[in-house]
Amino acid sequence: MSKLNDKHERVRARVREAFILFEHKEGSRLVDFKDVPTAVRACGVNPTAVQMTHILDQLAALNAETDATGYVGLENFELVVCNFLIQQEASLFRDDYHTLLRAFRAFDPDGRGFIDAESFKSLLTGKGEALSEDELAKMMTVAADGEGKIWYEDYAQRLANDGRTI
């Protein structure tokens, strides 16, 4: 297998893994349209609002041709998201662990090793690309512990891909 085909297969596998995480019912090969932005981000990228709108528009157009149920099928999701990832590859690398760690430490001046989840939520909703309430809630279930703390060394490790490409 050529390097290009191998890379495309890795992208395709990553897209399928993300899709399965948000599958409406196991084995249905459908994702609720409202979960698409989160599923795209689960591929390890954070598209801008304009890019996400473009992805959603493409999926809506394909969905209108095939099935208007409010769900996106695996084939359409895979086609649109793989094309997006491959076309945008150069700009879609995640920050590495150490970069993320430095960023989190900037919000922990006392060096406690954690950030208060409520403060983190305020930070996320007050700057940059806005997250929906649903996306924020899902993120907090992964990021925060049961006591409302985000232990950022662990969380940075989960967020980082340590140099792996899409």
Image (tube, rainbow, N blue to C red):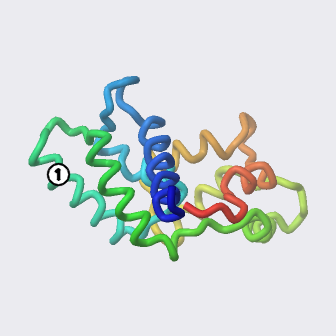
Q: Position of residue 28 (x, y in %)?
A: 32, 26
Q: Position of residue 6 (x, y in %)?
A: 52, 56
The residue positioned 75% from the left and 70% from the top of the image is: 99
* SS label for mark 1: helix
Q: Residue furthest left?
A: 65
**In the displayed structure, does residue 2 sit left or right of residue 84?**
right
The residue positioned 48% from the left and 46% from the top of the image is: 13
Q: Position of residue 159 (x, y in %)?
A: 66, 55
* Residue 38 visible, this orientation: no
Q: Amino acid at mark 1?
A: Leu
- The quadrant in which the C terminus is found is bottom right
Q: Residue furthest front?
A: 1
Answer few, some or many: residues within 10 Å of disc 1's Cα (few below 14, many 20 plus, some between 14 and 19).
some
Counting every numbered tag in the picture gives 1
Q: Residue furthest top?
A: 26
Between 46 and 78, the one nearer to me in the picture: 78
Between 96 and 116, the one nearer to me in the picture: 96
The residue positioned 48% from the left and 55% from the top of the image is: 11
* Residue 26 visible, this orientation: yes
**In the displayed structure, does residue 54 sit left or right of residue 157?**
left
Residue under label 1, please give it.
62
The residue positioned 51% from the left and 55% from the top of the image is: 1
**In the displayed structure, does residue 85 sit left or right of residue 80?**
right
Q: Residue furthest right?
A: 111
Q: Position of residue 98 (x, y in %)?
A: 79, 67
16 to 53, vertically: above or below:
above
- Examine the image and state in which quarter residue 70 appears: top left
